[in-house]
Image: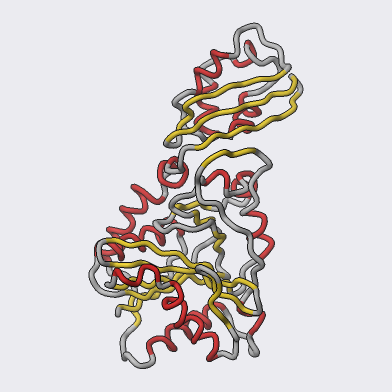
Amino acid sequence: MRYIDNNITDPYFNLAAEEYLLKHTKEEIFSLWRNDSAIIVGKNQNTLSEINVDHVKDKNIKVVRRLTGGGAVFHDLGNINYTFIVNDDKSFSDFKGFGKPIIEVLKSLGVDAEFSGRNDLLIEGKKFSGTAQCKYKNRVLHHGTLLFSSNMADVSAALKPKAVKFTDKSVKSVASRVTNISSHLSTDMSVEEFKAYIFKYLMKEEGKMIEGYSSLELEVIRKLRDEKYSTWEWNYGNSPKYEYSNEGKFQGGTVETTLSVKKGKIAELRIYGDFFGKEDIQAVEQCLVGVDHNQEAIKRALVTISLENYMLKISAEELANLLC
């Protein structure tokens, strides 16, 4: 097994690195890595229905879609992520087996951790690790979080969506009672020390060296990051088809909106309300059909028309914020 200590904290890079290791290498892998503040959404999720858009923008939190299923999770530098990649397609359903080494590490530190439910690791009934996995040919990637000293207020705030209505068939995240591993240790340990301890414990009988990525690997991963994992198309546009509705009250009156989104683009849109306008609102609706369902794209489209003619005393920014 190859042991990789990845000290890069760019979430776009790190999710790209997992795809590279899964699809473009042949050896088995164990890697530890951390991300700067980020929300990592599951492969089958509707991104917008999982996140607090305003909080994400305000705090400059990156949002990245991963290859595996399951729910959305918040990462910060107080969280360690671990990745196993094995050459055994029979391991795909063995969440408990992948969790066993992590539980053994914690037990060696006097922490009574346990596997629970479908894919969670708990301490005293509280979740410190959620796991997910995917398969590529005969290779299985299993990864999970290890909440060590994460900011729990940020976890809660980032994953609380706005009070708008989504109708879709995406996989929904389930809120859990969570805890930090550091709260259960008998002696103080930094997140970096805990990371080093995991490597030492798991490698104690193998005599292997801890590696990083080669310069060639870094080049390939960065290309994958730039072309896929840092793009709006992958992180938002790849969401399943969904319906979205919202309402707001502005100086110009109340506005209600309902829209349908397919492949990240607005497919249908209706705007209702008690606002005034000299011209028919259908022109605004048609202007936005085919536009990416994000605020910046909507604002760019609205610049091409005189919104004041259709919605008196309602700005393009106010309408864009309502629509996304």
Q: In the displayed structure, would residue 169 be above or below residue 252?
A: below
Q: According to the image, what is the colour scheme of the structure? A: secondary structure
The number of callouts visible is 0
Q: Residue furthest top?
A: 278
Classify residue 133 by image quadrant: bottom left
Return the residue nearer the eye: 71 or 77: 71
The percent position of residue 225, horizontal first and vertical second, equals: 36, 53
The answer to which quarter of the image holds residue 255 is top right
Q: Whole-percent x and y of residue 180?
A: 63, 74
Q: Residue placed at 62% from the left, 48% from the top? A: 52
* Quarter in which the N terminus is drawn: bottom left
- Answer with left or right where residue 228 lies relative to residue 25: right
Q: Nearer the viewer, residue 50 or 80?
A: 50
Q: Nearer the viewer, residue 268 or 300?
A: 268
Q: Nearer the viewer, residue 114 or 294?
A: 114
236 to the left or right of 206: right
Q: Residue at x 45, y 70 (%)?
A: 33
At x 57% / y 38%, what residue is drawn? 167
Counting from the top left corner in percent of width and height, residue 211 is at 33, 77
228 over 79 or under it: above or below: above
Q: Residue 156 appears at what percent x and percent y?
A: 66, 58
Which residue appears at 53% of the width and 73% of the height?
A: 146
Rendered-image quadrant of the C terminus: top right
**Relative to residue 255, is residue 28 depicted above or below?**
below
